[in-house]
Image (spheres, grey):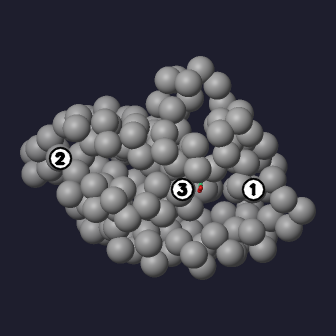
Amino acid sequence: IQKKLGHTNVILVGMMGAGKTTIGKALSSFLGKTFIDSDHEIQERTGVKIPVIFEIEGEAGFRKRESEVLAELVEKKNIILATGGGAVLNDENRQLLRRSGIVIYLRASVNDLYRRTRHDKNRPLLQTQNLYARLNELYMQRDALYRESAHVIIDSGKQGVRFLVQKLINRL
Ligand code: S3P
């Protein structure tokens, strides 16, 4: 599989809590590619956590930084890129990602997303009284955009990391 993929980038899209970072790291050691997380990169560059960026610059400010960082990162070769859940909201980002590697939509049900994000304090969009409703709303808005961006769709379900990675490898 390493030979077949060559230096092609593998790009993960999907909702917050879908497992992009976990699966991305596992894939990275399996495929021998460097793992990069765009949110992590934004935090490194600004020197502050994502919630602080949202607080000071609003979501629009964050999206601008996100698009800039994505455009830069996709210039690299042989990487596994985990994108933020909102990366696909922008039409140009969707096209950019699609032509920069194999894009995988890691799909998860709203129930699973809820389970994985319920104690999360680092995602500004999820700091709400009704987390389930918020996730459901975001899922409804975004599912089609993830599908439109992706070459491969993988259901993350309740399976373990190893199983998912194997499933994914079989589809690459
Ligand atoms: C966001 C997802 C987050 C982060 C920011 C906004 C979103 O990334 O970029 O909080 O709009 O879905 P993760 O998907 O890695 O949690």
Q: Which mark is on residue 85?
A: 3
Q: Could you say whether the residue bearing mark 1 is in a helix, strand or loop? A: helix
Q: Is residue 113 above or below residue 10?
A: below
Q: Residue furthest right?
A: 129
Amino acid marked by disc 3: Gly
Percent across and percent down for residue 131 are 80, 64
Q: Nearer the viewer, mark 3 or mark 2?
A: 3
Question: Mark 3 to mark 2: distance in Å?
Answer: 22 Å
Q: Is mark 3 within 8 Å of ligand 1?
A: yes
Amino acid marked by disc 1: Leu
Q: Which mark is on residue 8?
A: 2
What residue is drawn where x is 81% and y is 53%?
127
Q: Nearer the viewer, mark 2 or mark 1?
A: 1
Q: Residues within 10 Å of mark 1 (few under 14, many from 20)?
A: many
Q: Quadrant of the C terminus?
A: bottom left
Amino acid marked by disc 2: Thr
Question: Mark 1 to mark 3: distance in Å?
Answer: 12 Å
Q: Which mark is on residue 126?
A: 1
Marked residue nearer the N-terminal end (3 or 2): 2
